[in-house]
Image: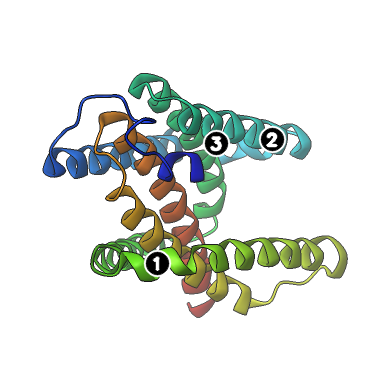
Amino acid sequence: MENVFARGEQESPDARIGAGTYNLLIGLVLCWGFAINWWLVRMVPVSRLESLPPLVFFLGYFVSCFLGVYLFTKSTMPLVSFIGYNFVVVPFGLVINLVVSRYAPLLVFEAIQVTAVVTVAMMCLGTFFPAFFQRIAMALTISLLLVIIWELIETLVLHIHHGIIDWVVVLIFCGYVGVDWGRANQIPKTVDNAVDSAAALYMDIINLFVRLLRILGRRK
């Protein structure tokens, strides 16, 4: 995401828009992604996803996500960035479909509520304390990489999963919401930057939701 949030005036040649319009566009793009996820959960049978060979599913997931991230981080054209965003939203939505199928609808709704409250709170903190979140950005990245490595070891080698890992990931992505929201409001306010910022926030929020759902599921 550094290519997006490191953009200055020269990297953002598009016409500027007002702060209110900019933030509204971020919200609308986020809502589009969540709506697509909801549609996929409702319309795509879980059995069809489970019937796919795991290698095919995960290869398609990573290829689509990397392509999407490449498109919206490299492009300064809103339409191209939005297409890239959708290349991320669809595979995320399919994974969410698999995840939420394991939990009761009321629990999923509770996780959505908690995620929304936490997200708004972190956005407010990111607005009021952008310098603090900028300082912890590198620590968050290093922590996330370490957690990913440790989870792979636990899953593939030790065949266990410690619940504390989910809490750690929740804290990391809470931090990322604050970081990315603060960065989003410090780069030039253009339509393309609004789309790109929404894409970064979308990935933060979805990861936060999935981990909160797992935590709430264990509690129940």
Q: Amino acid at mark 2?
A: Phe
Q: Amino acid at mark 3?
A: Pro
- State how far apart marks 3 and 2 are (Cα): 9 Å
Q: Closer to the N terminus: mark 2 or mark 1?
A: 2
The residue under label 3 is 91
Q: Closer to the N terminus: mark 1 or mark 3?
A: 3
- State how far apart marks 1 and 3 are (Cα): 29 Å
Q: Is residue 36 above or below residue 138?
A: above
* Direction from residue 117 to residue 210 in the image, left or right: right
The residue under label 1 is 133
For image coordinates 27% across by 39% down, the residue present is 188
The residue under label 2 is 57
Element type at marker 3?
helix
Q: Nearer the viewer, residue 96 or 151?
A: 151
For image coordinates 39% across by 31% down, the residue present is 11
Question: Given this view, does label 1 or label 3 mark the residue nearer the observer?
Answer: 1
* Direction from residue 82 to residue 168 in the image, left or right: right
Q: Nearer the viewer, residue 136 or 81?
A: 136
